[in-house]
Image: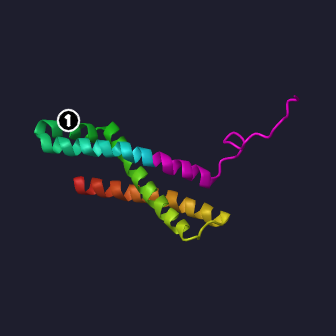
Amino acid sequence: MANVERPLSPHLQIYRPQITSVLSILHRMTGVVLGIGTLLLAWWLIALATGPESYATAAGFLGSWFGQLVLLGFTWALFYHLCNGIRHLVWDTGRGFELETAAKSGMAVLICSVALTVIAFGLAYTVGS
């Protein structure tokens, strides 16, 4: 039996990443981040209900530079997932599948998610001051 050279299935090492594929992977990753971030939110709420000492611990962590970085990442993941979800809803209507339109809507999702995150953190610091 001769060794037949069969074509390999396409995979990430063959194809150059495109914005649609990168955003699809990012959408899945932000879904996981939101799931983990929800545990952080639950911890904060439980600490709030438990008492001042528990709340001080949670608030101390969330107020630290690392906690703020985690909250920034969680906030961006939330807004990215929201914006990309709206994009998917438009796709469900059968529109937006042309390559140029898909690329432009992908860039719009990235820009909107960053803008909404900046606005949310700006408002949080304005109210907190």
Image-quadrant location for residue 70: top left
Residue type at tag 1: Thr
Where residue 14 sits: x, y (%)? Answer: 72, 42
Q: Is residue 98 above or below residue 63?
A: below
Q: Residue furthest front?
A: 1
Tell me if 71 is positioned left or right of 115 in this view.
left
Q: Is residue 113 above or below residue 93?
A: above
Q: Is residue 38 above or below residue 97?
A: above
Viewer-side residue, 101 vs 10:
10
Q: Give the residue displayed 45% in from the left and 48% down from the top.
A: 30
Q: Give the residue displayed 34% in from the left and 53% down from the top.
A: 121
Q: Is residue 16 magenta?
A: yes
Where residue 5 sits: x, y (%)? Answer: 84, 35
Q: Is residue 54 above or below residue 45?
A: above
Tell me if 103 is positioned left or right of 38 in this view.
right
Viewer-side residue, 123 vs 81:
81
Is residue 10 among what the camera can see? yes
Image-quadrant location for residue 35: top left
Viewer-side residue, 22 vs 93:
93
Where residue 36 sits: x, y (%)? Answer: 36, 42
Q: Which residue is mark 1?
A: 57
Image quadrant occupied by the N terminus? top right
Q: Residue furthest right?
A: 2
Q: In the image, which residues are magenta?
A: 1-30
